[in-house]
Amino acid sequence: MLVKFDSKKEVVKEIIKKTKGGRGALAGAIGMSETTFNNKLYERNGCRFFDDEDLEAMEIHAGTYFLAQYRAGQRGGLFVPMAEFELDAEELSEIQIKEMAALGEANVEICRALADDQMIDNKEAKAIKSAAIEAAARVIASKLAAIRVYGMDK
């Protein structure tokens, strides 16, 4: 799932959630104590926030794309990870079903927002944007998956 992040701190918190062993394991993986990790995360005791190398190391250790999504979002873009594994027609069908479900969810969010007062408030706009970004990523992934399955250069 794609997530729009407003800060690098949000990125780190999501990476922590996806890391087996949590904060302590992530701190150890990038070569620092959990205390130092927390001080950097919350910018306490004179510590500055993590540098780019630390953030990249966290991302790689956790196997996530949150930092890439954050950076793409800062430039008005969208990061879509490319599948690097073999697919068959059945798996492609599953990807296409998820694509259609994501498009439907984006439309459901719009309907929900307009149902009460025909206006979209900030909270509703955020939900619509999130669903639309997820749908866009699934559309791209689906089309690229079709090329992987049916392309001549397999």
Image (cartoon, grey):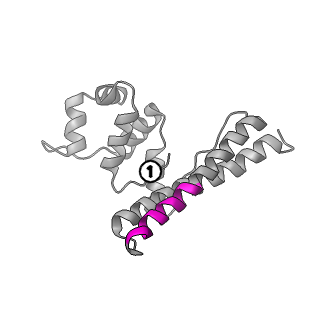
> In the rendered structure, does residue 123 fall within the stretch colored magenta?
no
Q: What are the residue bounds of the magenta stretch? A: 103-116
Residue type at mark 1?
Val
Looking at the rendering, in which quadrant would you find the C terminus? top right
Extreme residue toward the bottom, this view: 118
Residue 77 lies, in percent from the top left, at: 52, 61
Q: Secondary structure at mark 1?
A: loop
* Residue beneath the point at 33% across and 25% down: 25
Vertical relation: 33 (above or below) 144: above
* Residue beneath the point at 34% across and 35% down: 16
Magenta span: predominant SS is helix
Q: Is residue 127 left or right of residue 22?
A: right
Q: Which residue is mark 1?
A: 3
Extreme residue toward the right, this view: 152
Tell me if I can see residue 84 in this picture. yes
Extreme residue toward the front, this view: 116
Is residue 150 or residue 120 the one in the foreground? 120
Q: Is residue 56 left or right of residue 37?
A: right
